[in-house]
Amino acid sequence: GAVVSQHPSWVICKSGTSVKIECRSLDFQATTMFWYRQFPKQSLMLMATSNEGSKATYEQGVEKDKFLINHASLTLSTLTVTSAHPEDSSFYICSAYANYNSPLHFGNGTRLTVT
Amino acid sequence: GENVEQHPSTLSVQEGDSAVIKCTYSDSASNYFPWYKQELGKRPQLIIDIRSNVGEKKDQRIAVTLNKTAKHFSLHITETQPEDSAVYFCAAISGGYQKVTFGTGTKLQVIP
């Protein structure tokens, strides 16, 4: 079945540094991928919609200059958290679908801890 | 925009009993309703889904029902087992993934 891979699974970084998270669709092409943030015991909060070959669409309240999204190919989207701060510590998950009639599949998530 | 309410937020059942989780949505354009199971620290896994042209779908111990008129859909788990313990999320999706809205989640605990 469709598989979405996310890397890294966890990362610890120092405040002020940048972190890149990769999301890959392994056996299908994804023109659209979604990036979510999940706080403990809470639901999935959509951050942005990543579109291959064009600019990402960000949800209200999400800083596009802080959370840089690049969807350079049909199988890869990246989320870069720039100048990370402790409040950016969270669980970040991507998701993708093959076509409108296929399910939405999630990556395995990335646990970001900013010290 | 779409608003999805999910109830209850927590649910404890004895092993072998049934569990029901309900979601209501507001946007009549929503036409696809998946359910996900998420274990602690892991990715949400699709467990069952239903499209708006169907009223009920079943897969072994899991079933989903959809009432388009009332704009609600429910997840039913029968003969619950301890491994069913997890957080369950519903979602309402419209227009070929133009809009994806998740419910707030239900933490299910199955007591052995």
Image: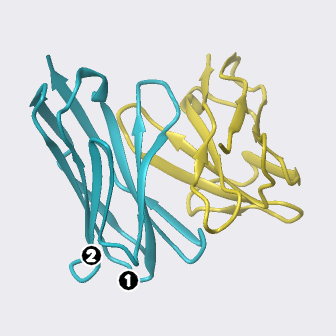
Residue at position x 12%, y 29% in the image: B16
Q: Chain of mark 2?
A: B
What is the total number of numbered labels drawn onto the structure image? 2
Q: How is the image coloured?
A: by chain
- CA–CA distance in space, label 2 to label 1: 7 Å
Question: In x, y percent, where is residue A54?
Answer: 86, 65
Residue at position x 18%, y 40% in the image: B78
Looking at the picture, tell me which residue is in the foreground, A83 or B2.
B2
Q: Does residue B40 sit above or below A6 in this rendering?
A: above
Question: In x, y percent, where is residue B33?
Answer: 41, 63
* Amino acid type, residue under disc 2 in the picture: Lys
Q: Would you name the residue on which mark 1 appears? A: B28
* Amino acid type, residue under disc 1 in the picture: Ser
Q: Would you name the residue on which mark 2 appears? A: B71
Question: In x, y percent, where is residue A11?
Answer: 68, 19
The kind of secondary structure element at disc 1 is loop
Q: Colour of chain B?
A: cyan
Residue that extends furthest to the front in the rendered view of this protein: B60
In the displayed structure, does residue B50 sit left or right of residue A15? left
Residue at position x 48%, y 39% in the image: B44
Question: In x, y percent, where is residue A36?
Answer: 57, 46
Q: Chain of mark 1?
A: B
Can you tell which quarter of the image residue A60 is in? Answer: bottom right
